[in-house]
Amino acid sequence: MAASRAPAFVAEMSAQWLVYDGFFLTGGAGYYHLTGTGPGIEAPNGYAYGNVGIAWEHRRWRIDLGYYRTGEKAQVLMPYPSANDRFAGSIAWRF
């Protein structure tokens, strides 16, 4: 969520590559552009972001582990402390 109510635009691309029997390498990159008009962000701004990771999928289960990186401008544009570099994981069950 951005720090203002100005229009924002996002372009993103992601992919996964099968490495071996249910194991994948994952990656993605994108750009977030905020048009401005908010406290501390009066001018248009934007930042690049990306991720790399691994995943394992078996039947209805999927486990993802990844490293996510954002541009320094994300610290200014986003009000949350999580807009920085971090590792993250998820477990999903499809039904």
Image (spheres, grey):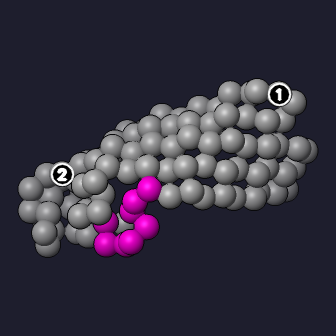
Element on which disc 2 rests: strand
Question: Label 1 sits on what residue type?
Answer: Tyr
Front-most of residues 94 and 61: 61
Q: Quadrant of the N terminus?
A: bottom left
The residue carrying mark 1 is: 20
The residue carrying mark 2 is: 45
Q: Quadrant of the C terminus?
A: bottom right
Give the side of residue 17 with respect to residue 43, left or right.
Answer: right
Front-most of residues 69 and 79: 69
- The answer to whether residue 5 is seen in the rendering is no
Q: Where does residue 49 sit, x and y in percent of width and height? A: 39, 45
Can you say whether 7 is above or below 51 in the image? below
Q: Which residue is at 39% across, 62% downward?
A: 83
Can you say whether 49 is above or below 2 in the image? above
Q: Where does residue 33 sit, x and y in percent of width and height? A: 26, 48
Element on which disc 1 rests: strand
Can you say whether 23 is above or below 40 in the image? above
Q: Which residue is at 68% across, 27% downward?
A: 17
Give the side of residue 59 with respect to residue 30, left or right.
Answer: right
Give the side of residue 91 with respect to residue 52, left or right.
Answer: right
Q: Which residue is at 62% across, 37% downward?
A: 26
Give the side of residue 38 with respect to residue 64, left or right.
Answer: left
The region drawn magenta spans 78-85
Q: Residues within 10 Å of mark 2 (few under 14, many from 20)?
A: some
Main SS of the magenta part reads loop
Label located before the other in sequence (1 or 2): 1
Question: Label 2 sits on what residue type?
Answer: Asn
Task: Single out the residue that lies furthest toward the right.
Answer: 59
